[in-house]
């Protein structure tokens, strides 16, 4: 669209404005248009199309004595802005949204399966026994790391969270869920069959599930599964110990714990440490 406007240099004759003036600076006679502005507009159109500018902007006008300082600064800022716009294609690169359609592959799926044989970081399971609990096709009967007090405490914590609701805190199968009418009661850990079962068997049940019991692979990491297995063994020993296995000086049955605070429905009871209770008794 062509419009007529007055020239700001003092000539009152109407002049063309708009794209006609930019595309053809000699369309009318009047105010001289610096060649660097015309070239800059061409540069901008070239940049908007996503390509590299074909011709550099003319600097003849900027070098002349008639060019004011403010115009040189404006031209420099404009040039920097336009040339930096050439990097837009590097910042906004082609990509695919998750599960979007792609015409590049024959099945038109953008999400591709991993290359065969690749292993994700942190999932290189070189120790087969640690991650499966099996030696060949049979469950093993050895812990993959030494059993310490810290291991048993961690196992007790995880057991009470994930296992006790069904198996109960002593492992006899009388947990909260079966007491509320669950279809099948879990077996007690203290029957002869499970007392003789290897530790790898318990690890496999936690990993793969058994019967109506789901697997806990996503909830419990491998080391915590072994910690739970160690605590299950401790429960079995505690419920079937003999007098010969009781340490010297240990009372039978053990004294019940003493509570500093009994706790409420919203808070757990606070147990008095054993060393503190003895000191209090002496006092």
Image (cartoon, rainbow, N blue to C red):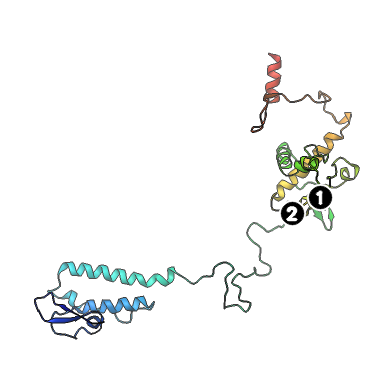
Near mark 2 (Cα within 10 A), the count class, few <14, some 14-19 or many ≥20, is some
In the structure shown, which secondary structural element does the residue marked by tag 2 occupy? helix
Pointer 1 residue? 200
Q: Image quarter for residue 281?
A: top right
Near mark 1 (Cα within 10 A), the count class, few <14, some 14-19 or many ≥20, is many
Q: Which sits in the foreground, 249 or 69?
A: 69
Residue at far top of view: 283
Examine the rendered structure and indicate whether residue 178 appears above or below residue 57: above
| One can see residue 58 in this view | no
Q: Quadrant of the N terminus?
A: bottom left
Asked if the residue under mark 2 is in contact with the one under mark 1, i.e. CB atoms within 8 Å, the reply is: no
Residue 54 placement (x, y as % from top left): 33, 82
Residue at far right of view: 192
Examine the rendered structure and indicate whether residue 38 appears above or below residue 112: below
Distance from the alpha carbon under mark 1 to that under mark 2: 10 Å
| One can see residue 231 in this view | yes
In the image, what residue occupies the spot 68% across and 17% down? 280
Q: Which sits in the foreground, 152 or 244?
A: 152
Q: Which sits in the foreground, 254 or 200?
A: 254
Name the N-terminal-most of marks 1 and 2.
2
Pointer 2 residue? 131
Q: Image quarter for residue 196?
A: top right
Residue 147 placement (x, y as % from top left): 75, 41
Q: Quadrant of the C terminus?
A: top right
In the image, what residue occupies the spot 71% across and 50% down? 222
Residue 25 placement (x, y as % from top left): 20, 83
In the image, what residue occupies the spot 60% across and 69% down? 111
């Amino acid at each position: 669209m062509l419009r007529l406007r007055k020239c700001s240099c003092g000539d009152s004759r109407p002049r063309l404005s708009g794209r006609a003036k930019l595309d053809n600076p000699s369309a009318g006679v009047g105010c001289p248009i610096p060649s660097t502005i015309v070239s800059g507009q061409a540069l901008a159109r070239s940049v908007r199309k996503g390509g590299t500018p074909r011709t550099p902007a003319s600097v003849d006008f900027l070098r002349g004595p008639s060019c004011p300082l403010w115009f040189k600064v404006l031209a420099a800022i404009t040039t920097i802005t336009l040339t930096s716009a050439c990097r837009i294609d590097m910042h906004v690169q082609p990509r695919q949204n998750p599960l979007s359609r792609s015409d590049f592959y024959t099945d038109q799926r953008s999400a591709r399966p991993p290359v065969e044989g690749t292993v994700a970081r942190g999932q290189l399971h070189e120790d087969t026994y640690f991650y499966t609990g099996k030696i060949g096709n049979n469950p093993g009967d050895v812990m993959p790391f030494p059993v310490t007090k810290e291991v048993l405490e961690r196992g007790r914590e995880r057991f009470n969270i994930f296992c006790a609701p069904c198996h109960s805190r002593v492992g006899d199968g009388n947990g909260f869920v079966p007491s509320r009418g669950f279809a099948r009661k879990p077996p007690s850990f203290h029957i002869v069959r499970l007392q003789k079962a290897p530790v790898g068997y318990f690890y496999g049940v936690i990993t793969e599930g058994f019967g109506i019991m789901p697997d806990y692979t996503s909830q419990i990491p491998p080391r915590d599964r072994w910690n739970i297995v160690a605590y299950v063994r401790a429960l079995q020993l505690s419920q079937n110990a003999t007098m010969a296995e009781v340490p010297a000086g240990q009372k039978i049955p053990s004294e019940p714990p003493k509570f500093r605070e009994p706790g409420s429905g919203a808070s757990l009871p606070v147990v008095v440490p054993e060393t503190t209770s003895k000191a209090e008794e002496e006092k």
